[in-house]
Image (cartoon, grey):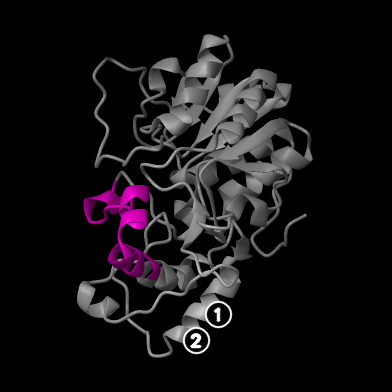
Amino acid sequence: MRMRPTLSWAPTEDLPPATTDLEPITDALSTGGVLVLSGAGISTESGIPDYRGEGGSLSRHTPMTYQDFTASAQARRRYWARSHLGWRTFGRALPNAGHRAVAAFGRQGLLAGVITQNVDGLHQAAGSADVVELHGSLDRVVCLSCRTFTSRHELARRLEEANTGFRPVAAAINPDGDADLTDEQIGDFRTVACTVCDGVLKPDVVFFGEAVPPQRVEDCRELVREASSLLVLGSSLTVMSGLRFVRQAAQAGKPVLIVNRDPTRGDRHAVTRVALPLGTALTTVADHVGVTVDDETAGPA
């Protein structure tokens, strides 16, 4: 189950010190077979905030839980008002140097795969193929009754038509695509139902309090089994949905390497934690292994 995140994670034991030495990551990628596990920190350079750290959204924002969403029509109305506004900004975010570097490593055959905890689709937009979206994607919507899937763009169009005068200004956008709005700003926002069965619509993402689909977890476990090493990018590993793969890799004797500015819950399992901005770190590593990273004006490969 994906648990609601806490405001911060405090280490309870002595952990290896952080470093700026990129040699272990360069060596791992040179060998190949690296499995990438990415978190919200890789998308901060695209303008999508992290949950934790300086400026993290948890200091002001409590993410929606599955239990609240399914139990209350008012909670759903509040969620969709905020998410609809957030999508206008969230959906315009572009991949940054970190995403483009991961895509370049994949094109060169250096990766065993990519697992992302993010729901923003930026790895795919950068050109990464066969990305496992551990927590789903905001780009899709599912009916909780008939399980029909539709695109988020289609839902956005329907919500625009149902709320033609809805133009509040959000205080901030959060990593889950939710915008910070007051009840007054939400006003009488109208939700829309499934066009097939009139059921409740939900973004195809794993809310806090909701279980990651078992087959998706097993697919990720298989990727860990096949990989030579695990490279964690921009995740605090506070929740078990990502930490379990770090533990699996470490128990199998596979090197775990982490790039994250702050300590993580997986540091004790890692051979190194590099505390550098992800875009800088990954483009530097790409230079070291002779991989060309597309510039920001280039489209996906």
Q: Residue at x 47, y 68 (%)?
A: 87
Q: Identify the main secondary structure in magenta.
A: helix
Q: Which residue is mark 2?
A: 161
Foreground residue, 178 or 295? Answer: 178
Rendering coords of residue 130 (x, y %): 71, 43
Q: CA distance from mark 2 to mark 1?
A: 6 Å
Rendering coords of residue 14 (x, y %): 28, 15
The crowding category of the residue bearing disc 1, from other C-alpha atoms within 10 Å (few below 14, some 14 to 19, many at least 20), is: few
Magenta-colored span = 54-80
In the displayed structure, would residue 17 be above or below residue 167?
above
Q: Is residue 55 visible?
A: no
Foreground residue, 28 or 7? Answer: 7
User: Split into 4 quadrants, where in the image is the C terminus?
Assistant: bottom right
- Relative horizontal placement of residue 198, taking residue 6 as reference (left or right): right
Q: Residue at x 48, y 79 (%)?
A: 159
In the displayed structure, would residue 203 be above or below residue 42?
below
Q: Residue furthest front?
A: 197
Rendering coords of residue 69 (x, y %): 35, 56
Foreground residue, 140 or 98? Answer: 140
State the mark number for residue 157.
1
- Relative horizontal placement of residue 282, taking residue 243 as reference (left or right): right
